[in-house]
Amino acid sequence: MKNKILIIDDDIIYRKIIQKLLCQKYNLMFAESSAEAIDLIDTKNIPDLVIADLNLPGLGGVELISILKHKLNKSKIPIIVISGMDDDEIKDQLFQKGISGFFTKPVDRITLKEKIADLILL
């Protein structure tokens, strides 16, 4: 059975790039906003990994990560942030919240695939 990844990004082009990159190996779920992502996650629909952008309609990135961590019952489900923002203070806040990786757009596809594979195998 394929592992499930939730991709949260409001940019359709970026979602298509990620879909093409990962669809053969993983089951993908997509959300275009913070609210949609939060609504997607329930006890029967838990992803094995989350990839989230920071600049989304609705909640700010740090707040979204806090809510996702809480909603996922503070589990060890890895969260990777991919963003156009390269702010060290925000990165520090996100790592303190428990993210597993941070990539700046445009992300190196090979590095991202390797990071995802490493995290899902943990």
Image: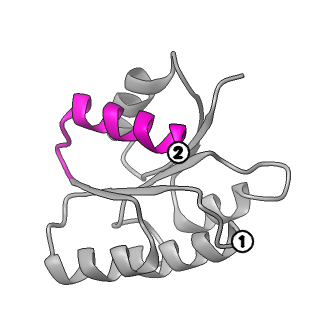
Residue 24 coordinates in the image, percent (x, y): 51, 15
Relative to 102, residue 48 above or below: above
Crowding near the residue tagged with mark 1, few <14, some 14–19, many ≥20 C-alpha atoms within 10 Å: few
User: Which span of residues is magenta-colored?
Assistant: 104-122
How far apart in space, not on screen, are marks 2 and 1 (Cα)?
A: 18 Å
Lower position in the chain sequence, tag 2 or tag 1: 1
Residue type indicated by callout 2? Leu
Residue 60, can we see it?
A: no
Residue placed at 34% from the left, 41% from the top? 115
Residue 102 coordinates in the image, percent (x, y): 28, 59
Residue type indicated by callout 1? Asn
Is the magenta region chiefly helix, strand or loop? Answer: helix
Residue 36 coordinates in the image, percent (x, y): 63, 60
Residue 117, can we see it?
A: yes
Secondary structure of the residue carrying tag 1 is loop
Q: Quadrant of the N terminus?
A: top right
Relative to 40, residue 69 above or below: below
Label drawn at residue 122: 2
Residue underneath mark 1? 73
